[in-house]
Image: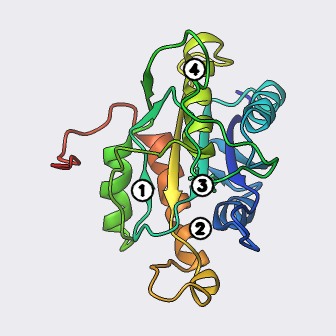
Amino acid sequence: MAEANLLLTGFEPFDREPVNPSWEAARALDGWQAGGARVHARRIACVFGQSLAELDAAIDELKPQWVLCVGQAGGRLEMTPERVGINMDDARIRDNAGRQPIDQPVVAGAPAAYFSNLPIKAMVRDLRAAGIPASVSNTAGTFVCNHLLFGLMHRIATRPVAPGMRGGFIHIPYLPQQVARLPGQPSMALETVVAGLRVAIATTLAVHEDIRETGGQIS
Ligand code: PCA
């Protein structure tokens, strides 16, 4: 059987940062083979609309069985698999093309939200077992990362390229070099993030039914 593809995306820098840890980590795994799958890393523009066009093109090119998107969430302490993407663009800052949509749907007429169909609870379990801080996140925000996650899951729901196609998103903290200029903010070393993405990918390939384990929040 031909090797299955896993599309791993990271974002270009945004918000005046010189780097985006999501692309630094994703590109370190380009070409990695695990469990019968090959990882293909792609860099995505931090731009509403264009990001989804780039994701669509990569999906059309690679016909991936799995899509894992990664983004920077400055201020977070842990690697955080996202549970849900909502059909809402509400930007606090401008994107890299100067756009700042307010209360616009990602896809007009589409459902209010989609859940990721990656095994997010099993990922958190396996990340923690590997010594890497992780929690489920119940919001991907309302900026370009949520936009990409919602668009990905809408694509999978309406135009999958493989039977049983799966997709999801992981937010990651700043890198230490970023917070050296942002005192007081949490960070995670690139090698830890890369190791964590290896774990998350291995879990994605191995676990078909997510585990039942608490990952909720009171508020
Ligand atoms: N993080 C932003 C967009 C790009 C990125 O890496 C977000 O969380 O929406």
Task: Answer above or below: position of 164 versus 173.
Answer: above
Q: Looking at the picture, tell me which residue is in the foreground, 166 or 11.
A: 11
134 left or right of 202 in image: left
Res. 199 mark: none
Name the residue located 64 percent from the left edge and 16 percent from the top edge: 160
Q: Determine the image quadrant of residue 210.
A: top left
Task: Answer above or below: position of 183 versus 200.
Answer: below
Q: Determine the image quadrant of residue 132.
A: bottom left
Residue highlighted by disc 1:
80
Q: Find the distance from the CA under tag 2 to the CA under tag 3.
A: 13 Å
Amino acid on which the number 4 mark rests in the picture: His
Task: Describe the element under mark 4 as helix, strand or loop.
Answer: helix
Place of residue 141 in the rendered image (x, y in percent of width and height, measured from the top left): 47, 46
Q: Find the distance from the CA under tag 3 to the CA under tag 1.
A: 10 Å
Place of residue 171 in the rendered image (x, y in percent of width and height, measured from the top left): 51, 55
Pointers 4 and 2 in contact (C-beta within 8 Å): no
Circle 4 or circle 2, nearest the eye: 4
